[in-house]
Amino acid sequence: MKCGCPVIACNSSSIPEVGGDAIIYVQPNDVEDLVEKIRVVEHGQIDTLAMAYRGYQQAKKFQWEVTSIQFHHFFEEVLIQK
């Protein structure tokens, strides 16, 4: 997503939480669904520019700098409470 490429991923585990509306989802182990979604992207049946923009915006939510600050605050709270 961060590179501006369309992403197709399984609709399972934490992937929908991370990908939000920036990913095209397929069902796990559904080869026909995957092939269809690849064709949709390949044949321009989806606005890949808009998808790339949404992906880049979504990826910004998961930066290491932000995560490290959040972890730092979390650990401070835990240690202060003990």
Image: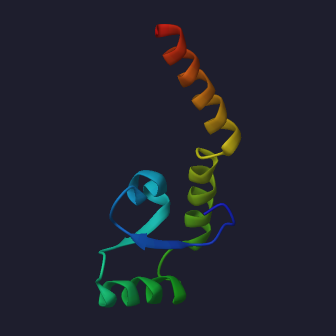
Q: Residue furthest front?
A: 82
Q: Position of residue 82 (x, y in %)?
A: 46, 10
Question: How has the structure been colored for display?
Answer: rainbow
At 58% across and 59% down in the image, what residue appears?
Answer: 55
Q: Position of residue 54 (x, y in %)?
A: 56, 57
The quarter in which the N terminus is drawn is bottom right
At 56% across and 72% down in the image, what residue appears?
Answer: 6
Residue 82 higher or lower than 62, as above or below: above
Give the quarter of the image for residue 52. Answer: bottom right
Q: Position of residue 32 (x, y in %)?
A: 31, 90
Image label count:
0
At 67% across and 44% down in the image, what residue appears?
Answer: 64
Left or right, residue 25 beside residue 8: left
Left or right, residue 38 beside residue 71: left
Residue 78 higher or lower than 51, as above or below: above
At 29% across and 84% down in the image, what residue appears?
Answer: 30
Q: Position of residue 76 (x, y in %)?
A: 58, 17
Residue 66 higher or lower than 28, as above or below: above
